[in-house]
């Protein structure tokens, strides 16, 4: 499958995977810092977000894990590569470092804890209320919303996730990325139906789908905003026990879900500091 991506710099690969509802432009503050730190930064589009749709129609997390590993392979990556993921990209990151730890030296994840922690969080009423959109995207109501005012709805999601952040530029990127109806449907209905319903899982991604619970061999720095509108900080604290002994959790006060956009300088420092440790 062809994967579209942005690239900057040279050196060991730093793969940056975006989340929902987002685009690779989310890394516009981080990419120059990573390049200056001596990395070849690659920021791909998630499946369905750009150009042709995946030929196999797979949108489950396991497919995103497979894409991350395949992209590392195609780019000629080695064990000095690092991987950074936010939201859905964090889930892809957990699977990639779990299934192929030899490919990655270090990882940074943001705004989404490993699968096991999220599964437990789904039993919390406050969490269920916050992720109403996932359940809505399983229903015919989603079709009505996506037909009438898709980007108005997506903008409300941004406002909900990161209250107070001006997402105007990000929504413009999203409009361009999901301009075609088939891409809009893939990035919403496709990915989130596969998120909750195993009937939409392809057997060929079974190994990738099963990966990502932790603990992990690859050291992870997990970043989480205390004002995250999706995943409350009190539940995210459980990530500390799921990551592994070489990893750590860092909370950013007063920051929401898109913490790398809300507090770019702080996040940039935390990412570069972590992934530069132990480099060749």
Image (tube, rainbow, N blue to C red):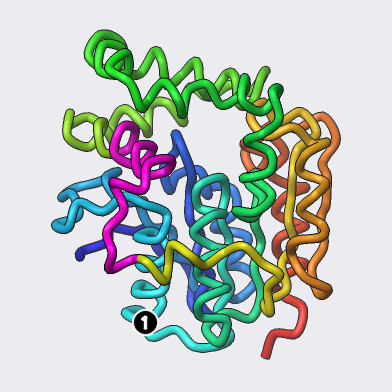
Count neighbours of disc 1 (C-alpha within 10 A) and say few if under 14, some if 14 to 19, many if 20 or more.
few
Name the image quarter holding the N terminus: bottom left
Residue 265: within the magenta? Answer: no
Q: Residue at x 27, y 33 (%)?
A: 178
- Res 6 seen here: no
Q: Position of residue 96 (x, y in %)?
A: 50, 70
Give the main secondary structure of the magenta stretch.
helix
Report whether 28 appears left or right of 279. Answer: left
Q: In the rendered view, would you say 84 is above or below 150?
A: below
Name the image quarter holding the C terminus: bottom right
Q: Position of residue 184 (x, y in %)?
A: 26, 31
Q: Residue at x 66, y 19 (%)?
A: 163
Near-viewer residue (274 or 119):
119
Magenta residues span 187-205
Residue 42 falls in which quadrant of the image? bottom left
Near-viewer residue (40 or 235):
235
Report whether 169 appears left or right of 232. Answer: left
């Amino acid at each position: 499958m062809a994967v579209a991506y942005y690239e900057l710099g040279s050196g060991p690969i730093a793969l940056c995977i975006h989340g929902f509802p987002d685009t690779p432009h989310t890394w516009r503050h981080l990419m120059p810092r990573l390049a200056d730190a001596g990395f070849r930064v690659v920021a791909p589009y998630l499946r369905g977000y750009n150009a042709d749709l995946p030929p196999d129609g797979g949108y489950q997390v396991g497919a995103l894990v497979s894409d991350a590993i395949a992209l590392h392979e195609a780019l000629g990556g080695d064990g000095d590569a690092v991987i950074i993921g936010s939201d859905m990209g964090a889930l892809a990151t957990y699977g990639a470092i779990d299934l192929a730890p030899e490919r990655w030296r270090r990882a940074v994840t943001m705004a989404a804890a490993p699968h096991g922690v999220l599964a437990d969080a789904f039993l919390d009423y406050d969490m269920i209320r916050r992720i109403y959109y996932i359940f809505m995207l399983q229903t015919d109501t989603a079709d009505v919303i996506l037909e009438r005012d898709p980007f108005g709805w997506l903008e409300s999601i941004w406002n909900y996730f990161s209250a107070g952040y001006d997402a105007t530029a990000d929504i413009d990127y999203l409009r361009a990325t999901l301009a075609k109806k088939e891409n809009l449907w893939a990035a919403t209905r496709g990915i989130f139906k596969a998120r909750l319903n195993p009937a939409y899982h392809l057997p060929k991604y079974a190994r990738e789908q099963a990966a990502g619970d932790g603990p992990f061999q690859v050291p992870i720095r997990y970043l989480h905003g205390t004002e995250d509108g999706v995943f409350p900080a009190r539940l995210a604290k459980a990530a500390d026990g799921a990551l592994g002994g070489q990893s750590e959790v860092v909370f950013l006060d007063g920051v929401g879900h898109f913490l790398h956009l809300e507090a770019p300088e702080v996040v940039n420092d935390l990412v570069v500091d972590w992934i530069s440790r132990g480099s060749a």
